[in-house]
Amino acid sequence: MSSAAVDTSGPPVVRERARGKHPLVGFVVRRLAQGVATLFVASVVIFFGTSVIPGSPATAILGHSANPQAVRALNHRLGYDKPITTRYADWLDHVVHGNLGDSAVVIAQGTPTAPVWPTIRSPLANSVTLALITTLFLIPISLALGAIAGVKAGRWPDHVISVMSLVFVALPEFVVATILVTVFFVVFDLLPPVSVLAPGEWALTQPKILILPVLTLLAVSVAWTVRLVRVGTIEVLKSDYVQTARLHGISEPRVLRRYVLRNSLAPSVQIFALSVQYLFGGVIVTETVFGYPGIGKQLVDVVNSHDTTVVQAIALILATIYIVINIIADLLVVLLVPKLRTQQ
Amino acid sequence: MRARALIPRRLPAFMRTGRGASGSVLLTIVLFIALFGPFFAAHDPAAIVGAPGSGAGPGHPLGLDNLGRDVLTRVLWGGRSVIWLSLAATALCFAVGLTIGLIAGYVGGIVDPLLMRTVDVVLCFPPLLFFLLVATSVGTSELTLVVGVAIVLSPGMARIVYTATKETATRGYVEAAVMRGESTFSILSREILPNILGPVIANLGLLVTFSILLIAAVNFLGIGIQPPAANWALMISENRPIISINVWATLVPAFMLAALTIGVNLVGDAVSHVVGRTEGIADVMASPAGSRAPTFSQAETV
């Protein structure tokens, strides 16, 4: 579209860079390197953040009244008698080779090995299912509502949508969940109040249990994204090219479709990346409310049982997913808006 | 007595909008219940007065909770901790964010990247995940709750202050103060601080909302305030198993919490509108979503 002109009219430095290899290659490489660096920092924070335990981890698991010999034996078995930097290096080495370690709590019960990965595989699949279904509804709903509010800015549809989003964005997930359960279970008895699954069962085999968790997550995340899409739409509506198109006598629906919606799509991609950040927190709470067997509920459970190795594994997986999604969003935006390729 | 006489002649500007007025009323009611509620409570919040989950009856208009304690009493008691914890966390977060942002933005040199990269590290984690990490290692107490929430939320504030400080630091009046030989502290407090208050205040409401939401979530997950304390968020998780026996035990605290967060958000929204118009913070905020916090007020000022 019109943005091709921007590349050639840029400052000399930009033009010089463009003459070499494809500007997109540099961008992708830079962004990937950045992602790996972030992931490394995240691993440091996760490991040291969970390792600063007053007393020893074995005491945290076995309790303060445990006999000192058992505590010492467990600390040795878990490798906690080594210096922290050695432990971090070992941990990182294992993780890079795909070994997430053993559950500290299960080891404490006397089992020789208790690999973490098999226990988090199925919750992870369930959480991804929940998040994907939510996103599937989130995108069209928030684009539609946000565009309506933006186009009708200052009039009643905008007021209704804006005030509703202001209200919903302020609600804690578990309050939304409570109200939904009251309506759909206590009053009408249509849907189950908890999302129970047999161990290892996949959530999609029982779609009914997904409805309330998805609605809960949607209520808050739609409220969040609608506001941002609305602002994007208003900004595009004020731009020169929309004015020009209107002055050319192009019909209003066509202006909205061809000029406004397309251009407000680019910031929207980043908005959805932001809302993924929200979904991470939202999923933890929502899964716990409904007893939904996902990674968020498991994280809360292992935090409560002081199972440090499992906390580290789950946190690292979540951080990785989070960073990957951000990279994908950035690349997608650059693909959609060529003029961003030469920036940074 | 005419109703009009009760309305002060000059209301603060933010209260004159529909959202600001309704938010203020809602917030006043909730704050009144939270702060003075305990004086009206008929029972001891920890006293077991009947069979668990009993419905409404004489002396117990909202019935009894999962352990047989009076729900109304616990609702009246349960707001104090919600409010003082989030105010303490907000205040700490405000102080930390302001200090980091001002120093990194004005002093520059090696301090700037050192502080701001640290801020970025915290920002690259979802807040609740970061808090769970903190809770795993240091355990749970009210102090952990306040400090943890402040650690998680202050980077957002630091970014806003940093951006505003950087911009203000190049203005003529700051350069004039440098020429006069004023100390760094006096330049920060007398030249820069008053001029960056716009974006800071515009985000204050959001900061309070975020800290209430985060603290409520942590309490709900059972890693914050511990039973038998009366706390709205904790009441919801305690009474959820008996929701079909006595729905009020879950629903009323849920409504109180909802009224509080909605009230704060409406007032915060109205305030940022007013501040946004008078201080022209739209320019400052227009930088593409540097953190998750400012995006909202960005939405507000357009």
Image (spheres, coloured by chain):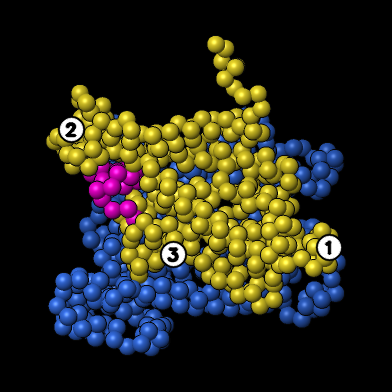
Chain colours: A blue, B yellow
Q: Residue A344 vs residue A128: left or right?
A: right
Mark 2 / mark 1, whichever is N-terminal: 2
Q: Calculate the distance from the C-alpha at mark 2 to the C-alpha at mark 3.
A: 39 Å
The label shown at residue B130 is: 3
Residue at coordinates 28% horizontally, 35% vertically from top-left? Answer: B73
Chain of the residue displaying label 2: B
The label shown at residue B176 is: 1
Q: Which residues are magenta?
A: B224-246
Mark 3 / mark 1, whichever is N-terminal: 3
Chain of the residue displaying label 3: B
Disc 3 on helix, strand or loop?
A: helix
Q: Are marks 2 and 3 on the same chain?
A: yes
Amino acid type, label 2: Ser
Residue at coordinates 68% horizontally, 58% vertically from top-left? Answer: B189
Q: How many marks?
A: 3
Q: Nearer the viewer, mark 3 or mark 1?
A: 1
Q: Calculate the distance from the C-alpha at mark 3 to the C-alpha at mark 1.
A: 43 Å
Q: Nearer the viewer, mark 2 or mark 1?
A: 1
